[in-house]
Amino acid sequence: MAAIGLRTFRKTGFWWLRGNPWAPLSAGFCSRGPGPRPTSARQRDGIRNIVLSDPKRRNALSLAMLKSLQRDILHEAESGDLKVIVISAEGPVFSSGHDLKELTDEQSPEYHAEVFQTCSEVMMLIQNHPVPVIAMVNGLATAAGCQLVASCDIAVASDKSSFATPGVNIGLFCSTPAVALGRTVPRKVALQMLFTGEPISAEEALLHGLLSKVVPEGRLEEETMRIARKIASLSRPVVSLGKATFYKQLPQDLRTAYHLTSQTMVDNVALRDGQEGIKAFIQKRKPVWSQPDALTRWPHRLMGRARLV
């Protein structure tokens, strides 16, 4: 059954991205590609910075924005040079959520379905990605914008930021944002946000687990990049294994979770970097991490998982 679903997904999912021409993401930075795009991306020292770059439209997650973000996340994800992704935004609004102009009855139900399906795929892609994804938030994040923050592995925000799921106020309940929000904050907090549409402050978001850290606006980039550089200095195979296992064990019962993670620890010890780190600690020296070869099959496996979750 899974194989059938994966074959279907290969015909209908992200596969057009594989043939899209891109400038190489080497030591420098990634170009925007042919024509204007609502996101920009650059990569240096293992850190890929993706910026939502449509401040005039409050960085709305239009279909074009979602596909551009999807492409930036997927690009050369199998490369050992990529260690961590940081998602930020231009302007005073991190993201206002879906572009409501795309959700009127001037568009077909099929188009609406494509918008929400693409958005869901992007959110699952973040969790299924082999490297950690950090949200750097400086401003308002609402609806699907709040969903994007909740979907990231780590979220750092300025103290001026706020978060809301206000769809109920315009007759469009934030059902898809509720998936990420409800898995990140306590149920009663999520439901109050969903039922009232009222925003919460950065400090409240930190208290309830939506954020990892809140800092003054002037220190936001410094602190976010400090975290990103720390992750980038570590072994990618070890971090990737740890991330995948963390999410895999979460829904399991206690016994199954310990069985799963015990086997993962055995697998981790068997990794070249697992042995290197242990020996370096014993020998009181810094470890020298491997530079993994490109995992050429990774996007295929990831896409299948994203579709079948």
Image (tube, rainbow, N blue to C red):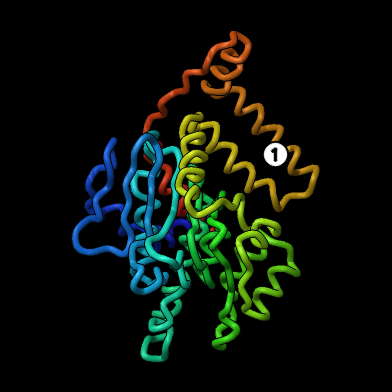
Q: Secondary structure at mark 1?
A: helix
- Write the residue at 66% across / 73% down: 193
Q: Residue furthest left?
A: 34
Quadrant of the image for the C terminus? Answer: bottom right
- Write the residue at 69% across / 61% down: 185
Q: Is residue 164 left or right of residue 40?
A: right
Q: How many marks?
A: 1
Quarter of the image for residue 263 reads top right
Camera sees residue 11: no
Residue 134 on image: x %, y %: 50, 49
Amino acid marked by disc 1: Leu
- Write the residue at 60% across / 83% down: 168
Residue designated by label 1? 260
Q: Residue furthest top?
A: 283
Q: Residue furthest right?
A: 255
Q: Nearer the viewer, residue 294 or 182?
A: 182
Quarter of the image for residue 279 reads top right
Camera sees residue 289: yes
Q: Is residue 234 left or right of residue 192?
A: left
How crowded pointer 1 is (Cα within 10 Å; few <14, some 14-19, many 20+) is rated as some
When the figure is inspected, residue 203 is found, relative to residue 100, above or below; the finding is above
Q: Nearer the viewer, residue 256 or 278?
A: 278
- Write the residue at 51% across / 67% down: 141
When the figure is inspected, residue 229 is found, relative to residue 3, above or below; the finding is above
When the figure is inspected, residue 297 is found, relative to residue 284, above or below; the finding is below
Q: Nearer the viewer, residue 191 or 242?
A: 191
Quadrant of the image for the N terminus? Answer: bottom right
Residue 103 on image: x %, y %: 43, 83
Residue 241 on image: x %, y %: 56, 36
Residue 221 on image: x %, y %: 45, 48
